[in-house]
Image (cartoon, helix red, strand yellow):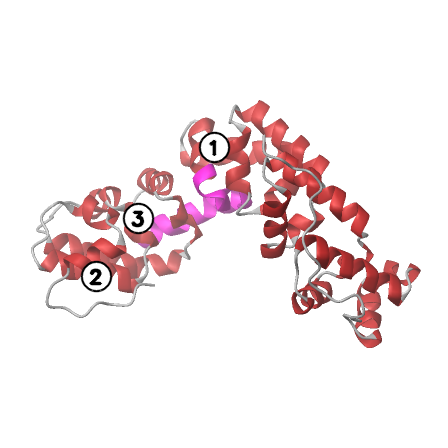
Amino acid sequence: MRSCGPKKLPHVIPEESNLMSDKQLAAAVDRLPELSRLSFEDMRRNLRGCARICGLTERKAVDLAKRRPVLLKTTPAWLEENVAAGALCLDVSVERYAQLCRSCTEFMLLDAEAMRTNVEALEERLKIPRKLIIKAFVSRPFLFTVPADVLVGRVVESSKTLGVPYYVFAAVALKCPQLLSIPPGSLAKKVADSARQLGVGKEVMCSLVVKAPLLITRKPESLEARLRLIEEAARALGDRRPIAEILLAAPAGLCYGEARLRQRILLARQGYDRGLGRLFAMSDGNVQKLLKDEPSLEVT
C-alpha cells in the first residue's frame, strides 16, 4: 500500500485573489439555488481551498466552478478528507489522486466511501481483482458512481447479447470500459445496425465486437467506408476470402480512421507478405518505417 498521508500541494492562488466576480457568483447561485445559504466570500474561500488541494490554477478553478457550481459549496476540509480517502481506495498517493481531480473533476466530487463499496461489490460478484476494476474505471470515473447491481446486470445481459459467458464480456469491458456505459438494449441495436452495414450475420458481428470492442463505439454508418478499405488491403495481399473471414482476421481495422487504413493499403501494395492480421495489428510507427517511396500519411 502506498503512502496516502494528508500531504498538501503548494498554494497556487494568492489569498488576496477574488477568483470570481460578484456577477459570476450570482450566476452560479441562479444555477444552484442552495448556494444562497453562503456568502460570496464563503464561496470564494471554498473554491480557493479546492484549488489549493487539487493544484488548480486560478483560471482552471474559475472555469470548473462555472461548469460545476457545486464546487463553490464544497468545503476544503471535506475535499481534503475525500481526496485522501479516494487515494486510499485507488491505492495511489494523494498527489496522484489530485492529478486525477485536475484531469477530471468527477474525482473531486466522488464519494470515496461509496466508490470503495462499489468496487468491493463488483470484485465479489464478478470475481475480478479490484486493481483491474480500478484501472479500467479511472478512464471512465462516472462508472464508480453506477451501483454495482446495475453494472453486474449490464454485464450479464450484454454477455447474452454477444453470445459469450459473462466473465468473457467482463474481461472485454475491462479493456474497453465504454461498453459498460451502453445499456444492453442499446448494445443489441448497435450490433444489429453494424451487422447490417457490414453485410455480415449477427454471430460474426458479435465475434468482431469481442475481438475489437472499440468497434461498438463507432457509428454504424461509418463502417461501410472502412469495410471497403479493409477489403482493398486484403485484395492487395492476394487474400480472396469472403469478407466475413477477412474482418474476423483483422477486426481492428474497423476502428481505424481512413488515413491509417490507406497506409496499410500502401504497405500491402509494396509487397508486405506477413498476412492481413499482422498488417492491421502493426503499430503506426512500424508501418511508416516499412513504407518506401511513398509520402507518409497523417494518422488519424
Percent coordinates x, y for residue 12 in the rendering: 69, 62
Percent coordinates x, y for residue 218 in the rendering: 41, 55
Alpha carbon distance from label 2 to label 1: 33 Å
Whether pointer 1 and pointer 3 mark residues with C-beta atoms closer than 8 Å, the reply is no
Report helix, strand or loop for mark 2: helix
Residue 266 quadrant: bottom left
Q: Is residue 60 above or below residue 99?
A: below
Q: Earlier in the sequence, mark 2 or mark 1?
A: 1
The amino acid pointed to by label 1 is Ala
Alpha carbon distance from label 1 to label 3: 19 Å
Task: Return the mark for residue 252.
Answer: 3
Name the residue rendered at 70%, 38% in the picture: 85
> For the residues carrying marks 2 and 1, which lies nearer the camera in this image?
2
Return the residue at label 1: 170
The stretch drawn in magenta includes residue 275: no
For residue 214, side relative to residue 5 (left or right): left
Residue 262 quadrant: bottom left
For residue 94, side relative to residue 174 (left or right): right
Q: Nearer the viewer, residue 237 or 80?
A: 80
Return the residue at label 2: 263
Name the residue rendered at 77%, 60% in the picture: 47
Report helix, strand or loop for mark 1: helix
For residue 281, side relative to residue 60 (left or right): left
Q: Earlier in the sequence, mark 1 or mark 3?
A: 1
Whether pointer 2 and pointer 3 mark residues with C-beta atoms closer than 8 Å, the reply is no
The stretch drawn in magenta includes residue 194: yes
Q: Which residues are magenta?
A: 174-199
Report helix, strand or loop for mark 3: helix
The amino acid pointed to by label 2 is Gln
Name the residue rendered at 72%, 67% in the picture: 66
The quarter of the rendered structure image containing the C terminus is bottom left
For residue 124, side relative to residue 202 (left or right): right
